[in-house]
Image: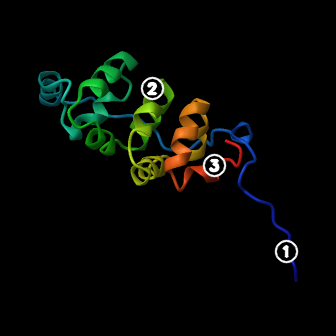
Amino acid sequence: MIVETTSMTPDTCEDLIEVPDNRICDYDPCCHLQLRDFIQTMPNIRTDLICLLYGQSPELIKYIFNNHKDIKSLISAADHCTLAYFMKNLDNFGDILAKFEGEYIDWIFGKLYNPCYYFCTLPRRVRDMLVIKSYMLPCCGRQH
């Protein structure tokens, strides 16, 4: 018996839509000690405090990202909700990721529940830079 299948890979990024997930990104308010540590160590906040950036202004996040001594470790500590927030709200987040090696880029996008959607929200020039380095992202759209 022959079964005909269709490709699940979209032809272009325009064919993608955001897939809603049932996870709620709602963090408990931090305790005053975490907030104190966050403020006292800015811009070099500890990696375990990255969830405090969820919901913050893009200007504050950009300040921390532009001045942190180990931005790679900081971004690595982010969970899917925080990464999705960065992707949606920071116009330069793709540029930051494009500075890293392909395996790291794939690992970060792999933490997202809909990596192709977020990849396709990036500007074309950033997608081109990421596709060159990544093994996973070219699968997001043959003509990204």
Q: Which residue in the protein does label 1 denote? A: 3
Type of amino acid under label 2: Asn
Q: Is residue 114 visible?
A: no
Residue in view at x 44 percent, y 49 percent: 111
Measured in 3D between alpha carbons, the distance from the residue under mark 1 to the one under mark 2, in whole angstroms, is 44 Å
Residue 52 or 67: which is nearer the viewer?
Answer: 67
Type of amino acid under label 1: Val
Q: Position of residue 121 (x, y in %)?
A: 59, 33
Residue in view at x 49 percent, y 49 percent: 133
Q: Is residue 142 above or below residue 67?
A: below
Neighbour tally class for label 3: few under 14, some 14-19, many 20 plus, Cα within 10 Å: many
Q: Name the side, left or right, on which 114 lies relative to 79.
A: right
Q: Position of residue 108 (x, y in %)?
A: 42, 47
Residue 20, quarter of picture: top right
Measured in 3D between alpha carbons, the distance from the residue under mark 3 to the one under mark 2, in whole angstroms, is 20 Å
Location of the N terminus (image quadrant): bottom right
- Which residue is at the far bottom? 1
Residue 100 or 65: which is nearer the viewer?
Answer: 100
* Tag 3 near tag 1, CB within 8 Å: no
Q: Which residue in the protein does label 3 denote? A: 140
Residue 37, quarter of picture: top left
Q: Is residue 136 visible?
A: yes
Residue 98 or 31: which is nearer the viewer?
Answer: 98
Q: Is residue 111 above or below residue 17?
A: below
Q: Position of residue 94 (x, y in %)?
A: 47, 33
Front label number (1 vs 2): 2
Q: Which residue in the protein does label 2 denote? A: 92
Residue 69, quarter of picture: top left
| Among numbered discs 3 and 1, the one appearing first in the sequence | 1
